[in-house]
Image (cartoon, helix red, strand yellow):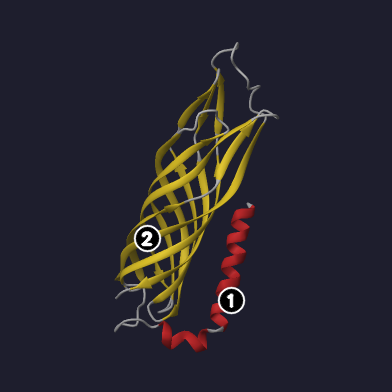
Amino acid sequence: MSSLLKTTLISASALTATILMASPLMTQNAKAGMDGNPFEGLYLGLNANYAKVDPSATYTELDADTSTFNGITSSKKSTGYGGTIYGGIGTNLWGPMYIGIEGGLGLNGGSGYVSDGTKSYGLKAGFSFDLNTRLGMTISDRILVYGLGGYTSTKYSSRGFNTKQSKSLGGYRYGAGFEVGILEDIALRIEYIRSEHSAVTWAQAGDSFRFDPSGQIIKVGLILHMD
């Protein structure tokens, strides 16, 4: 089990335990709207992100006379921080079954590098645009668990190259999360997301690097339900 996933599970368990211990005090405040369901209708949210990027790089020597790289000997995933603003709409289709659609704008964070032992080249995740569909179950009037899938476009910038380069790479994302109502119309959300992006190739002197990045993100935030 990866350290990132372990961090997610430990954080989620600790927060859930704290909230459930305080549930007698919060139950009434958590019931939003006439139907007592805080998860239906329009909502806005803000997340803090903790992310890693896997560079998944390959190397090609273009010109032996100008090449300065001796081949990939190691690869590194570096963590980073960011944030996302998002909005969407959700509803219970049948009984506790929940479906929602949302979009988000923000900074993913995280970077990835490859090295020959002396020099390192890589890319860093920046501005992102996401579209998700969420499908889940309302466990109670305070708890929603769900899976998600959708599209992402993330701008990656080069690191270690003489010339700075950047490109927005499209891809898909999937993951899971849960929401817990903590106050009237306000819920806490925790998500774990993986993303896979299209490839980009950048050159350095007589060397060429092809990056096919993927990401892992933990998101923790608050949601305002406006219904």
**In which image quadrant can residue 146 be found?**
bottom left
Counting residues from the start of the chain, the first of labels 2 and 1 encountered is 1
**Which is closer to the viewer, label 2 or label 1?**
2
* Numbered badge on residue 17: 1
The amino acid type found where label 2 is placed reads Tyr
Most distant residue in the top direction:
65
**In which image quadrant can residue 22 be found?**
bottom right
- Residue at the (57%, 24%) spot, across then down: 59
- In three-dimensional space, the C-alpha distance between marks 2 and 1, rounded to whole angstroms, equals 27 Å
Nearer to me, 61 or 177: 61
Q: The residue tagged with tag 1: helix, strand or loop? A: helix
- Above or below, 79 against 115 in this view is below
Residue 40 in percent (x, y) is at 32, 72
Residue 173 in percent (x, y) is at 43, 49
Most distant residue in the right direction:
117
Can residue 216 be seen? Answer: yes
Q: Quadrant of the C terminus?
A: bottom left
Residue 176 in percent (x, y) is at 47, 59
Can residue 1 be seen? Answer: no
